[in-house]
Amino acid sequence: MVFIGKRQRELSGRLVILLSAILLISSLLNAQDNAQEEDEPRITVEVSPEKIIVGQRFDLTIFGDFPSYRTVKIKEPELPDGISLAGGPYKSAQTIRVGEVGDARYIKKTRVYYKFKVDKPGIYTMGSFSLSDGENTLVTEPVTFPAVAFDERNFKYPVFASWYSLPDEVMVGESIPLILEMQNLESLTFPDNVKMDPPAGGMFERVNSLGEITVMEIGEDEVYIAPIDSWLYTPTAPGRIKIPAASVVMGNITRSTSSHYINVVPTPQEIVATGAIGAFSLSVDMENLPPDKGKVSVLRILIEGDGNLNYLIMPQPEFSGMTLIDKEELSDYVPSRSGYSGYREDVYRLQVGDEPEISIVIPPWNWFNRDSGTVETENTDPFRFSNQVISGREENLSFADRFSMLGIEDVSNQRRAFYNIPLYYLLLLPGLISILAALIRKRYDARIGAFFLLFAVLVSSSSVTLPLWGDKLQKARQLFEEEKFTEADDIYSELISGNEENSALYYNRAIIQYNLDEPGRTVYLLRKALNLKPGSRLYQNALAAVEEEYGLERQVRATSGLSPDLFFLLFILLFNGGALVISFNIRKRKMELTILIIMVFFLSLISLAIVGYSHYVSRTDAAVVNAEEGELKKVPGNSGGSWLTLQEGTTVFVLSRSDDSLLIRTGYGLEGWIEKSSLLFLNREE
């Protein structure tokens, strides 16, 4: 162990000696290099003052290691634009002390002095000066310095407004970005005001977030080039267009860009019909195929990509054997440096006519590829079909097979809607009486509940069926079975005139009208029956079946589909149940009963709200088209031409009227004027 410790001490001592020797040699070499550097001639350049203001003069001083300034010759660089010589060069000798006091030495240098004047703000770079005395030649490094305007005297660098990369030539319809930038910002600051007049001869839109912030280094400082505002401009005619100057107010300074001229040239002949410039793709989709007679098919044409989506013309399809019902234009695109990015879509709703062949052809669609400079063509396959005439009466289960007239007993037992009978509101009295009795007696009495049940039975049994005559119903049914539909319809028309609240009469008459081949009246009568009894599954299924058979799609919602009677009875039960709980809780106050009371009455209010909603919807101003061709016009009266033809049986909302014309809205959202004589009104007489 002793031997090992001694060996380690010897190695450590040798290592210390070796490191000391290396450090000594390195110091000697470094001192020699410094001495050589001090012996080499040097040249420096200085600019003063530190802040240079436009219109003032500034000094540029050069110090060179030349013993005699008289023999020095100067080669000057070309002055930057905006800098002019105001005086110089002046040469003189300069003695400079080098080193600390006590170890100082003095060196003779040549001083060259210039005076310049700055004419406009900017960040200038003065090129290299070359000084030579015949033996040595010294060259200065380029020097960079800012010059600011008087209103920028609190800034270190001058601020400019400029356009980002404006083109000199574009095509008609080409969307180009106009990005206004502020240069040399020491911090990112929002402007107080930006003003620009729109260019003439085109589409001009103010947009956001087109430019990007750039960081630029000036010496040890960082400044920003920041987008302040941006627009998209789409020229619509050839010619020479002036982009006006834009001005920016930021604090106490105002900066303006220069105006810019752009040459607008016509588009290539191949894209005159579309005007599309950018990078696009075309896709086509057809829904509800194969199309059937009377049914509505949907054609979707989609253009997506980057470019002048705001300007281009969408492909125009050619239809044969189909009628255009509605066209909807959809779009979703955002500004970009290439114009707009996103899509445009045209949605066509088409109805099959009587022609044997159906075809939809979309012609080739051309667009100009801005990147490659070529014209691209988008082609789609045409849609061709044979007209599939499908009639509900030719199927195994037609409407007539699935639905038949209700019997005499069913018709006679039809009641009015409970919530429309004032007598039924007396069912609220037991609950109120039970609360009153509990307050008087201060305790709950089971006999109160028995009274409630007895009262409910008495009120329920007091309702009387609507007076119908069995012999007339029997006669109408006999005529119907003998296919004497017109005579049977006359009997039901007479019965309805005296019993307008009986939904079964409307339903049976709808069956008769169906056999008379009256689509409009069939739909109208079924909707009348459903308005009187919204919760009837029979009426709902019958209406859905007949509308499907007639090809009636996207009908307006004229009923809620909820039974107000069901929710009215639920309201009665909840209200009286809550009242009984209150009467029981008057004597024994418990938190659980209080919570139960709140919940029960909350549910009763919901039930009452549903009753009100169902009643409101069933009373909306709706009507059914009762003409083979209900002509929809854009203006009321006889002066306007037909715009669209509505199918018989179409249900619409009535919005307003003008003399004998009514403004309506269809299930597709289309609005137009139609003659009053073409409609059957569900909830009012005209």
Image: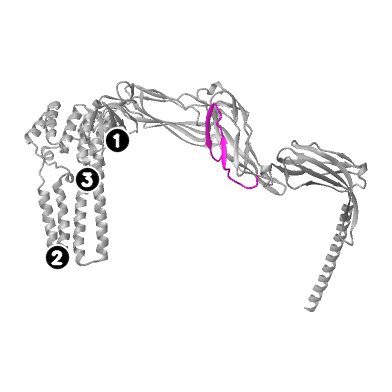
Expressed as whole percent of the image width and height from the top left, the position of residue 220 reads: 71, 49
Asked which secondary structure carries label 3, the reply is: helix
The residue type indicated by label 1 comes to Val
The quadrant of the image that shows the N terminus is bottom right
Residue carrying label 3: 564
What range is drawn magenta here?
185-210
Q: Amino acid at mark 3?
A: Pro
Which is more N-terminal, label 3 or label 1? 1
The residue drawn where x is 86% and y is 48% is: 42
Percent position of residue 17, x then y: 85, 68
- Residue highlighted by disc 2: 441
> Closer to the camera: disc 1 or disc 2?
2
Colour treatment of the image: one colour
Disc 1 target residue: 556
Q: Secondary structure at mark 2?
A: helix
- Left or right, 160 with respect to 624, comes to right
Q: Are marks 1 and 3 in contact (CB under 8 Å)?
A: no
Percent x, y of residue 125? 75, 41
The reply to whether the magenta stretch includes residue 126 is no
Assign a secondary structure to mark 1. Answer: loop
**Which amino acid does the dot numbered 2 rest on?**
Arg
Q: At x 32% / y 29%, what residue is drawn?
A: 295
166 sits left or right of 359 in the view: right
First along the sequence among labels 2 and 3: 2
Q: CA distance from mark 1 to mark 2?
A: 55 Å
Report the front residue among 14 and 627: 627
Quick check: is 201 in the magenta stretch? yes
Work out whether residue 63 can be spotted. yes
User: Residue 386 falls in which quadrant of the image?
Assistant: top left
